[in-house]
Image (cartoon, rainbow, N blue to C red):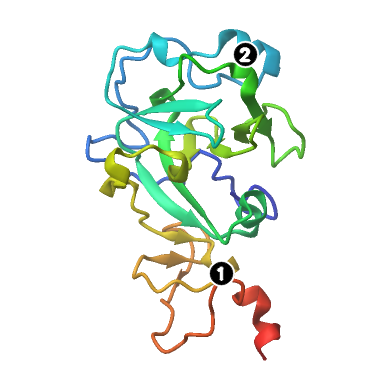
Amino acid sequence: MPTKNGKSSKNGNGNGDKKQSSQGHTLMDPPNTGWKGPTLLGTAVAKRDICRSLPTAGNRKSSSEIHAKCWCGKLEFEYHGDPIDAKHCHCTQCQRLHGAPFQWAALFHKTSVRLAKHCDPLNLDFFSTQEGHSEHSVPCKISCRNCRSPMADEGRNMVMAYPSSFIFKDHHVPAAFAPTAHIFYGERVMDLDDDIPKWAGHKNSSEQLPHAPKDETDRTMGKGKRHKADRD
């Protein structure tokens, strides 16, 4: 998510919304997970130090969790409870980093996330979009070192998880993971007619954009805003 060109970072820091999850958690109210020890990745330190002290799910008492796995299975995270919010981000940075027209992200407190006990922390890989290098410097992207699957954005207090990597029971996506907004929709490469609020920038702090006209059918994937000249 954007960290340059005057856009504030959304790498797990949130945007000030105080939406409650179904369990009553808000940005200002971290849930009581029962997990002990430091948060997901601690503060920005050398990767080898993280790997020595990274907390795992073995340090928890709570059993209310959802699992997320990378493509090869070498990385697995456990998330406690429901996300605080979920959004689709259309910024060009997300498009390039994910190789997709937009990113689907769900916001969690860092205290709600743990690396599964059986996973080797050496399979964690990091990329700082602010510094432009591969090291653990929050905010940063987290991916699998083996298969390169993107797993999450880590901020100083929050984690933006990617629900596409979650293992939902019966493949049913819970309502708490449904996006409440399209953000940076002004940078989109495709129109979406889904009645979800669309914002030029951050949710609730930028211009709200109109939904796609019902009769506009030529703006499909790959033929969006940045490809308008190809249609004219």
Check if mark 2's residue and mark 1's residue have beta carbons within 8 Å: no
User: Relative to 170, is 137 above or below?
Assistant: above
In the picture, measured across the screen, residue 211 lies left or right of residue 150, that is left
Element under disc 1: helix
Q: Which residue is pictured at 64% across the width and 59% down the height? A: 92
Crowding at dot 1, Cα within 10 Å, few <14 / some 14-19 / many 20+, comes out as some
Residue corresponding to mark 2: 51
Residue at position x 40%, y 59% in the image: 181
Q: Nearer the viewer, residue 171 or 36?
A: 171
Q: Residues within 10 Å of mark 2 (few under 14, many from 20)?
A: some
Q: Earlier in the sequence, mark 2 or mark 1?
A: 2
Quarter where residue 192 is shown: bottom left
Whether residue 23 can be seen here: yes
Q: Is residue 152 left or right of residue 114?
A: right
Q: Where is residue 146 drawn, in percent x and y?
A: 66, 30
Residue 20: horizontal and vertical position, in percent? 27, 42
Taking depth in this image into account, of 85 and 56 the one nearest to the observer is 56
Mark 2 against mark 1, which lies toward the viewer? Answer: 2
Q: Amino acid at mark 2?
A: Cys
Say if residue 19 shows up in the picture: no
Q: Quadrant of residue 62?
A: top left
Please tell me which residue is depicted at 29% across the width and 38% down the height of the picture: 169
Quadrant where the image shows the C terminus:
bottom right
Identify whether 215 is placed above or below 191.
below
Taking depth in this image into account, of 205 and 129 the one nearest to the observer is 129
Q: What is the secondary structure assignment of the residue under circle 2?
A: helix
Q: Position of residue 220 (x, y in %)?
A: 53, 76
Rounded to the nearest angstrom, the CA distance separating label 2 from label 1 is: 39 Å
The residue pinned by badge 1 equals 186
- Residue 54, quarter of picture: top right
Three-letter code, disc 1: Gly
Residue ID at (37%, 54%): 179
